[in-house]
Amino acid sequence: MEFENILIEKENSMAIITINRPTKLNALNKPTIEDLHHALTHLEKDVDTRVVIIIGSGEKAFVAGADIKEFSNFNSSEGSQLAAKGQELLFDYVQNYSKPIIAAVNGFALGGGLELAMACHFRIASTNAKMGLPEVTLGLIPGYGGTQRLAQLVGKGIAMEMIMTADMVNAEKALTIGLVNHVVEQEELLAFTKNIAQKISRNSLTAISKAIKSINANYKEGVNGYHEEIKNFGECFGTEDFIEGTTAFLEKRKAEFKGRN
């Protein structure tokens, strides 16, 4: 598949999506959001893809925010529609994606860029990464889930301070507050992320998908995460991956999971 604003590279069981708008520091606009949605939809159906990595092109930015020119003249209704559509097509879609998505944060991840990284299942940052939600400097607030996911990841107080001050945090601070899982040198970022992706890909994709659902359930209003876990745990017993995993354990060999229900 070919896209205007992203590149896709397949490597073994991994798909690496590169957001490719280097002259705009990979800023998100509507076509880029749509490209990402269509690519992820395709990869979710691809049985050979077990893990997805998202990274920005170049060394300066993962995604340096949204494309402000697109919405500088919007009214209230148009602004609400922009946020709702973006969350539906990309940010909520990524969070609830059935396959693991890892954000490899190289350089700036600001505004919509940090919101995209936070929607991914976890984040790995390069040492030169800088992250923040500067929307209040534009008279806005984060609109792609940033007010919710940042507080979930780092706690209410730190989220309040980051959003109110619009300050960026560096990679070391992001690691300390739990915004990212690992920090590595930029030249090692992709290789390090691929190594984790390979570890994940050896496990049951069916079970991982149900784990994603169960973990996310804790953050959904009106949903009991423990009940969701019980349901998904039980459903695992009816899958081919469960049969393969337990059989391999008893036969003292490595399991070869097919990712099938």
Image: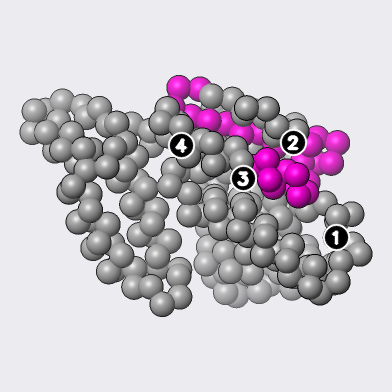
Q: Distance between the residues labelled 2 and 1?
A: 19 Å
Disc 4: which residue:
45
Q: Residue at x 66, y 33 (%)?
A: 18
Marker disc for residue 37? 3
Q: Residues within 10 Å of mark 1 (few under 14, many from 20)?
A: few
Instruction: Say if 94 sits above or below 196 in the image.
Output: below
| Secondary-structure class at tag 4 | helix
Which residue is farthest left? 250
Disc 2: which residue:
5
Foreground mark, 1 or 4, reads 4
Foreground mark, 4 or 2, reads 4
Q: Distance between the residues labelled 1 and 3?
A: 20 Å
Q: Residues within 10 Å of mark 3 (few under 14, many from 20)?
A: some
Q: How far apart are marks 2 and 3 (CA)?
A: 12 Å
**Quadrant of the frame with the C terminus:** top left
| Secondary-structure class at tag 2 | loop
Instruction: Say if 190 sits above or below 163 in the image.
Output: above
Looking at marks 2 and 1 on the same chain, the residue that comes earlier in the sequence is marked by 2
Marker disc for residue 71? 1
Specify whether 23 is left or right of 6: right
Looking at marks 2 and 3 on the same chain, the residue that comes earlier in the sequence is marked by 2
Specify whether 223 is left or right of 170: left
Instruction: Say if 168 sits above or below 202 in the image.
Output: below
Q: Does the CB distance between marks 1 and 4 fall below 8 Å? A: no
Q: Which amino acid does label 2 sit on?
A: Asn
- From where the camera sits, is residue 126 visible? no
Q: Distance between the residues labelled 4 and 2?
A: 21 Å
Specify whether 76 is left or right of 204: right
Looking at marks 4 and 2 on the same chain, the residue that comes earlier in the sequence is marked by 2
Residue 59: horizontal and vertical position, in percent? 74, 33
Residue 15: horizontal and vertical position, in percent? 53, 30
